[in-house]
Amino acid sequence: MLNSKALAAAMLVMAVLLTGLFSSGCVTKRDIEGVNDRLDNIERQNAETQRLVARMDSVIADGADADRKLRADLASSVDDLQQQIAKLLENYADLVQRLDALRRTQVVKLPPGSSPGAEAAPETSTAAALNAACDRSYDSAFILVRKGQYDKAITGFKNFLDSCPQHQAVANAYYWMGECYYSLEKYQDAVAQFDYLLKNHKSSVNGSRALYKMARSKQELKQKGEARLLFERLIKDYPRTLEAEQAQDRLKELK
């Protein structure tokens, strides 16, 4: 293929040939026309070559852009799916807790010797009313989390824990307080909440999520060694969970 330099060289050769012909005194009109035809042919070939090269460069560039866009779209789709799954898990965990609480409030335990038609004892009514108040306190704080009012939610959960230390949603309250602190970028406070939850409520449905967010908090605090240990613990203690898969990816970042 000929570029502009090759074309110039070709034209120089033709000029030399013409000079030789003229100097010999035997040049004819046919000779000149033949040279011109060759030059025109070379120019056409050069123009076609440059067009093809430009086209190839364009195709390669378009392919690279398309590949980058596809990779970006796939990464974005995966992130969106993970976020949606995480939200579904959050809603599911709290729905289970709420249903369990509802069943407990609906089942009234009668004192020994009482008949099914007998009126509930005052102590039972008081306990049910207290439990209902605790439910409302927890629900109010949880709604504030959903609204993104994290400071108010933290205050609400603290009031709930002070008033209802034996409530079945206590473990969830510690988890959501940790999430609120994490959202506020108060990572040290978040670690404290998640750590308390994992040590004192080991059977919590939020165990894997709390451990993951605790490791992420350590990562944000630049405590990479501790973060790595927590991610490895998560993979070991909670295999085949979404958080374990995410921990695998985070460990690659810490290498």
Image: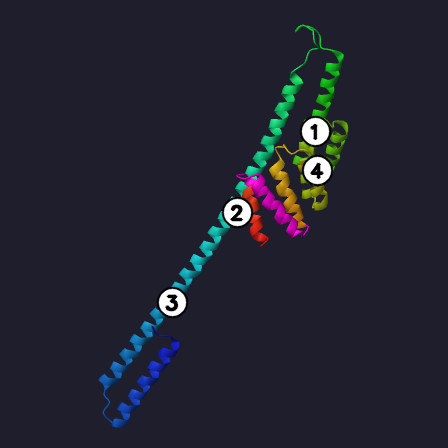
SS state under label 2: helix
- Which comes sooner in the sequence, label 1 or label 4? 1
SS state under label 1: helix
- Which comes sooner in the sequence, label 2 or label 4? 2
Query: Residue at 64% across / 48% down in the picture?
Result: 227
Determine the CA span between mark 1 and mark 4.
Answer: 18 Å
Determine the CA span between mark 1 and mark 2.
Answer: 34 Å
**Label 4 is placed on what type of residue?**
Tyr
Q: Which residues are magenta?
A: 221-243
Q: What residue sits right under mark 4 in the picture?
A: 196
* Mark 3 vs mark 4: in front: 4
* Mark 2 vs mark 4: in front: 4
Residue 153 sits in which quadrant? Answer: top right
- Which comes sooner in the sequence, label 2 or label 3? 3
Residue 135 sits in which quadrant? Answer: top right
Give how far across and how far down residue 206 sits, in percent: 62, 35
Q: What residue sits right under mark 3 in the picture?
A: 53
Query: Residue at 48% across / 55% down in the picture?
Result: 68
Q: What residue sits right under mark 2 in the picture?
A: 76
- Which comes sooner in the sequence, label 1 or label 3? 3
Q: Nearer the viewer, residue 9 or 238?
A: 238
In the picture, the disc for residue 210 is none
Q: What residue sits right under mark 1 in the picture?
A: 138
* Mark 1 vs mark 4: in front: 4
SS state under label 3: helix
Asked whether 127 falls inside the magenta stretch, the response is: no
Give how far across and how far down residue 18 sits, in percent: 29, 88
